[in-house]
Each structure stands twice: as structure tokens, then as C-alpha cells.
Amino acid sequence: MSRRASITMTTDEVRAFLEEQRVVTVATIGPNGRPHLVPLWFVVEDGELVGWTYRASQKVANLRRKPEATVQLEAGETYDQLRGVTMECDVRLVEERAEVARIGAAVAARYSGHSGPEIDALVAAQAVKRVGLRFAPTSVVSWDHRKLSGTY
């Protein structure tokens, strides 16, 4: 088995890793043709990363032009502990206000630990200015250097 194959995460390991992580780096292509990188909070739904952002943001302008992104999540402080997942994704912009609010409430619940009518009201007020983002992976690459047991 190749070294590369030996550090690849299983589907279940990727799923667990995504659930553990808090910030995904999203790369879209900016108007000048260069990568535009931004952090994003997210939830995992049906194998997709889902988040929301301001409708007028640069990443939304980029995604309207080309609805594709590469996303990356990483963890580990030392080389032997590095783990990560990179996914090439087709991206769907969600503009229906009730669905944008639902996504916003899910993100708020994950990061604040709170949900309920008060959060829903705050999120609904924000949903007017926002869009949802659904990142559907078309390619997944993963690595977990812990599988090497300290040898590389």
C-alpha cells in the first residue's frame, strides 16, 4: 500500500472529522481570476457543508459567476498529527428566505449552543440580507498522519 493510501480517511472518518471542525476555508475564483479564500461557519447536512453569508459578499459574487468552490478543513499542531479534508464542490446558492433562515438557525445553534424562538427571530431578521450556501462535494481528498504511527 502506498503512503498516500495509508493516510487516507475512510468515509466514516471524514464524516466524523467534518463534525469536529468549526471553520472551513472556502476558495472561489475572484473577478481577477485568482483564488479568493474566506473562512466560513457551517453545518453538515446529507453529506454537504451548508452555511450562510451576506448576499453582497465577494464570495457570493464569485459563486454567481462560477458556482464551484474548493473547501479545506485542517487540524493538528505537529506534522505527525496533521489531518485534513479538501473537497471540490458544486455550490448551490439558496435564496428562498425560509430556507435561508433555517440554515442560519442551524448554524447559530451549532456555534452558540442555543436555539428557540429568540434565536429564530434574530436569524429571520438577518436572513433578509443573506443567502444560504450548499457545498456538494464532487471530489474528496483526505489525510490523517496519525495513521503513520510517528513514521514518515
Image (cartoon, helix red, strand yellow):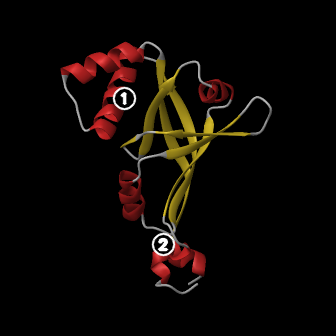
Q: Quadrant of residue 12?
A: bottom left
| Residue found at x 42% / y 40% | 42
| Other-residue count near label 1 (Cα within 10 Å), few / some / many at <14 / 14–19 / ≥20 | many
Vertical position of residue 75 compared to residue 63: above or below? below
| Label 2 – label 1 distance at C-alpha | 32 Å
- Give the structural element (helix, strand or loop) at label 2: helix
Image side of residue 132 versus residue 65, left or right: left
**Residue corresponding to mark 2:** 81
* Residue 4 horizontal/vertical position (percent): 59, 75
| Residue found at x 55% / y 45% | 25
* Residue 145 horizontal/vertical position (percent): 51, 74
Amino acid type at image mark 2: Gln
| Residue found at x 31% / y 40% | 110
Image side of residue 77 versus residue 22, left or right: right
| Other-residue count near label 2 (Cα within 10 Å), few / some / many at <14 / 14–19 / ≥20 | some
Quadrant for the C terminus in the image: bottom right
Q: Nearer the viewer, residue 89 or 149?
A: 149
Q: Residue at the bottom extreme?
A: 151
Reading the chain from its start, which is encountered first: label 2 or label 1? Answer: 2
For residue 5, the mark is: none
Amino acid type at image mark 1: Ile
Q: Residue at the left extreme?
A: 116
* Residue 5 horizontal/vertical position (percent): 55, 75
Q: Quadrant of residue 34?
A: top right
Vertical position of residue 52 compared to residue 124: above or below? below
For residue 103, the mark is: 1
| Residue found at x 22% / y 20% | 118
- Camera-near label (2 vs 1) is 2
- Count every numbered label the image shows and give the total: 2
